[in-house]
Amino acid sequence: MYEIFRNQIEKITPLLDAEFDYILSHFTTKKLKKHQFLVQEGEEVKYEYFVLTGCLKAYHTDAEGKEYILQFALPDWWITDYQAFAKETKATINIDCIENSEILAISSYNKEKLCAEMHKIEHFFRKKSNAGYVALQQRILSLLNKTAKERYEQLLELYPTLFQKVPKTLIAAYLGVSRETLSRLEK
């Protein structure tokens, strides 16, 4: 069951079985139901999460109730409220399950402990953070410079399985368009 997690680490650095077991011992496994919150706005964020199964969404809801999706998380992806996790502040976003999900959770303390003890894992987390910064920059530039159709086509090209798991209304919210506009883009 944890092979997906080990494979992600080993794409960056090889591990001995004992090393992987030690790393895994710093995580806890959580099972969540569809629509269950992982993080709620205003609560403390004590963990960073790795998705083993399922699908989650990170989003902000404005004063009028409009939902803005910041991120989806499929198996083999990481998710949390990174600002709240890093700064030990209250969550500014919500994260909930689009479908039943199983995740690994690591506390800030355990992450720092592992990084201090194992150069391999520090290297892994640094590489993953850098990849996350690149993805965020690409998403911002896409929102600034691409048309809705171009954003739709890019999302479809990069993450085709997302369209099988995520309702169209959520895809539209991620792209920053209405559901009707998304229907037109699909044609």
Image (cartoon, rainbow, N blue to C red):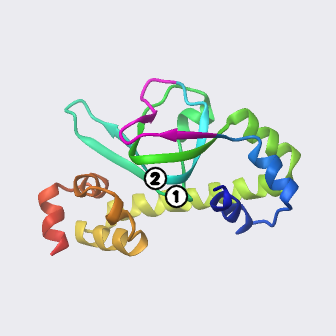
Q: Which one is in front, 93 or 8?
A: 8
1 and 2 marks in contact (CB < 8 Å): yes
Q: Secondary structure at mark 2?
A: strand
Q: Which residue is mark 1?
A: 75
| Mark drawn on residue 140 | none
What is the quadrant of the C terminus in the image? bottom left
- Residue 45: tell me if it is visible: yes
Residue drawn at (43%, 30%) of the image: 40
Q: CA distance from mark 1 to mark 2?
A: 6 Å
The quarter of the picture where residue 152 lies is bottom left
Please state if 14 lies on the left or on the right of 34 as rendered: right
Q: Which residue is mark 2?
A: 54
Q: Is residue 36 magenta?
A: yes
What is the quadrant of the N terminus in the image? bottom right
* The magenta segment: 29-43
Q: Identity of the amino acid at label 2?
A: Gly
- The total number of labels drawn is 2
Residue drawn at (70%, 41%) of the image: 27
- Residue 180, compared with residue 80, is above or below; it is below
Q: x and y percent of residue 29 in the render?
A: 62, 41
Q: Secondary structure at mark 1?
A: loop
Please state if 31 lies on the left or on the right of 26 as rendered: left
Please state if 4 lies on the left or on the right of 139 as rendered: right
Residue drawn at (54%, 56%) of the image: 77
Q: Which one is in front, 144 or 28?
A: 28
- Residue 58, compared with residue 46, is above or below; it is below
Q: Identity of the amino acid at label 1?
A: Pro
Circle 2: is it few (<14), some (14-19), or many (20+) Cα within 10 Å?
A: many
